Amino acid sequence: MPYTTEEGGRLNNFANEPKMYEAEPPNPTQRRNYIILGGLAIALIAGLMVVAVSVS
């Protein structure tokens, strides 16, 4: 483990940092799936609002 010594002789223990990586942009199939899921989520919320208004 990486220790550093501070003023006064105190040891400070730091956590290991995770490896960094760059995210890849979504491919066309993933983009299409995101759009479909977004549309379904909007339809679900709209349906729930219609039910809530009709019940009240």
Image (spheres, rainbow, N blue to C red):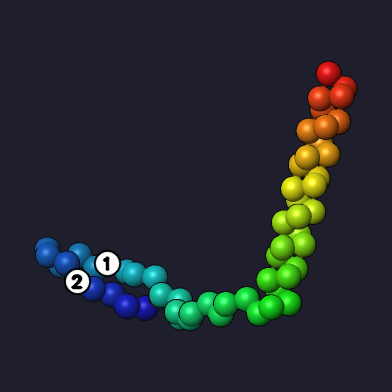
Alpha carbon distance from label 1 to label 2: 6 Å
Q: Nearer the viewer, residue 11 or 42?
A: 42
- Specify the label residue 5 is tagged with: 2
Residue 44 quadrant:
top right
In the depicted structure, whether residue 12 falls above or below residue 19: above
Q: Amino acid at mark 2?
A: Thr
Q: Nearer the viewer, residue 25 or 2?
A: 25
Q: Is residue 56 left or right of residue 20?
A: right
Which residue in the rendered view is the most extreme toward the left?
8
| Point 80% across, 47% down: residue | 43
Whether pointer 1 and pointer 2 mark residues with C-beta atoms closer than 8 Å, the reply is yes
Q: Position of residue 54 (x, y in %)?
A: 87, 24
Query: Tag 1, which secondary structure?
Result: strand
- Specify the label residue 12 is tagged with: 1
Q: Is residue 40 left or right of residue 12?
A: right
Q: Quadrant of the N terminus?
A: bottom left
| Point 23% across, 73% down: residue | 4
Q: Quadrant of the C terminus?
A: top right
Residue 28 quadrant:
bottom right
Total numbered circles: 2
Q: Is residue 22 left or right of residue 2?
A: right
